[in-house]
Image (cartoon, grey):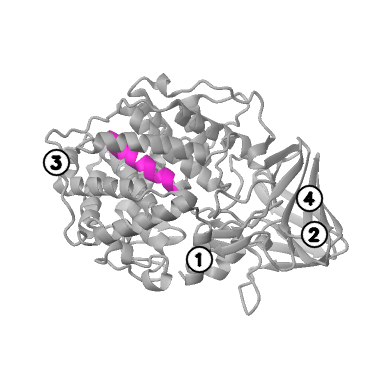
Amino acid sequence: MSPGWYLRRLSRMGPREIAGRAGDVLRKRRWRGEYANPRRPDPLARREFTSVMALPEVPDDAVKRLVETAEELLAGRAEYFGVVREDMVAPDWTLDPRTGRRAPARAYAFDIAYRSEDRVGDIKQIWEPSRHQHLTVLAAAYALTGDERYATRVAEHLRSWWAANPPLTGVHWVSGIELGIRLLSWVWVRRLLDGWPGAPGLFEDNPEALHQIWHHQRWLAAFSSGGSSANNHVIAEAAGRLAAAAAFPWFPQSTGWRADASRALDEHLRANTFGSGLNRELATEYHGLVAELGLAGALEAHAAGVAVPETTRLVLLRMCDALATVVDSRLHPPRQGDADDGHGLVLDGTGTHRWGSLLATGDALFGRRDWWPGTDVGADVRTPLLAALAGSRDGTAFRVTAPRPALRPTTLPDAGMTILRARGAHGEIWCRCDGGPHGFGSIAAHAHADALSVEVRHDGVDVLADPGTYCYHGQPEWRAYFRGTLGHNTLELDGRDQSVSGGPFLWTRHARTRVLTAGDTRWSAEHDGYGTATHRRTVTLDGTDLRITDEVRGDGEHAGRLAFHLGPAVTVELTGTTARLSWPGHDREHTAVLELPADLAWSAHRGETPGASRPPLGWYSPGFGRREPAWVLIGGEVRGGDTLTTLLRFDR
């Protein structure tokens, strides 16, 4: 990163964080001397894996999906962020298949410029297979079928990875979130391989496994994310430490590590979660990631007979209630903020409904409310396995008694999120209105400049869409577009974002939003991101009619653009200020008319790539690393003092 970035990043830290980071620098210098000859742990003489469970009954369709995915993995095929790999029989753990580059294999971890795509390749592509979540899939397939081919492949990959990645060497020892998630995977691999004769020799009786497990925990105890970086990363670190110390209590330090990790998980889950249960990063996929991590870590402690704090369980309960609050009729949540397809624990095959699975897990562990939506989107493997783990002790001891909403909330006031809903003749009309803070903490790493933006769906189909995320590193013009104001259904003034970016995961000035009204059919809010000009938006849902009114208030002259991004399934015919929309529904073709503000000059764009002084326009990212063309309507020549009215009418 440039010197300017370091100065901007430093400006977002407090004295305590600066002191802590200085200590990290000194520790990394001290540890450099041992990376060529890492310390060997002194494990306890008596080592057994006792965190076992009786395998529950798993629905046939979930087992079928799991086995199909496991067979693909045995054949060496897996897809990561839109890139299909066919080398997964014996993977190169340093290879980025997208660029063909390899990260340094034998360098001291903290010397590697892992953010530089030119030097190491796409780090997400390199890191993802080394979370070993494909190994939890194979191990689950073994547990449910008894087919030893799956167990054998797991053992081959673990031995290969351990040999290729000694402690403190290479890119897999740079980021704590990677170590934490990897530990969670190893715990579940050992549990699911428990009936396999080779399991003890792979783990508790294997000096190399003990070496790796100890060094992972030592690393996480030394370099916990803190201060402005204490977001989902610190949750993964704490959950992985807690799970490993509870399930692998094979070292003199295990008891202390477990107690420290339990305190850290409780503290940071509370700090990262609004009282309403929504994750404070206001990036929905990270809500799912944090919930999965928190549940996995807490259940591991519970299974080991360690009391899980009531406050931990209360946060996880509220996260499940919040998810049930915001999902649409197809159980898809908002597409707010960053999303990188990250999972805390993977025990299912491809095609499993992530959000339906998480709600089913919440139901099994805490009980559903009457207003929760149904979860009839296919069964999963993870829910019965987690429920069985909870039941290996007193399953009711994991539950928590606390007040819960009696009716489905329309708004989560502390998060600034309101969901307007109406029932049309052909499905639910769902509208998310964004009036919340600009992300979490001083850097708001995973926030987008999307204040007052809306998402609108019809029967679960994106009509006015949040385009998504697409990328993090290596493609700055695309990163800027997908997280910028023009890339959302809101108003851009003077050609700049509402909040000021200082880097791909850094915002140096945050727009402040104030919600004025939040009801079942009407929402209104304003933000101060443009200094002397205030953008105010009011949204009203009246049956099948959605009205959006935008006002620019304040002093001075301001020129702007109003954007409406359409979902990838939506086609558009734009005539003047009338846009006729159509898309295939689940049972028939659906249509809507978008009456745009008459005072603006409207144009339609689709699949435009960046050029000289020209941003990309008209794209939708269905998942990290993937993008596809989609229509966006841009209205230009907005002026200060204008009042703009947009009317979206769905077919009746």
Q: Secondary structure at mark 1?
A: helix
Q: In this image, 255 relative to 413: left or right? A: left
The amino acid type, in three-letter code, at marker 4 is Arg
- Quadrant containing the C terminus is top right
The amino acid type, in three-letter code, at marker 2 is Ala
Q: Which callout, 2 or 4, points at the residue further toward the start of the chain?
A: 4
Q: How many marks?
A: 4
| Span shown in magenta | 233-246
The amino acid type, in three-letter code, at marker 3 is Asp
Residue that appears at 43% across and 33% down:
383
Q: Which callout, 1 or 2, points at the residue further toward the start of the chain?
A: 1
In the depicted structure, whether residue 15 falls above or below residue 98:
above
| The stretch drawn in magenta includes residue 262 | no
From where the camera sits, is residue 3 visible?
yes
Disc on res. 579? 2
Residue that appears at 88% across and 61% down:
598
Q: Which is more toward the observer, 579 or 119?
A: 119
Q: Which callout, 2 or 3, points at the residue further toward the start of the chain?
A: 3
Asked which quadrant contains residue 410, the reply is top right
**From this viewpoint, which residue is outermost toward the bottom?**
612
| Label 4 Cα crowd, 10 Å radius (few <14 / some 14-19 / many 20+) | many
Q: What separation in Å lies between label 2 and label 3 (alpha carbons)?
A: 67 Å
Q: Which is more toward the observer, 378 or 418?
A: 418
Q: Secondary structure at mark 3?
A: loop
Please identify, in this view, whether the residue under mark 1 or under mark 2 is nearer the observer: 1
Residue carrying label 1: 7
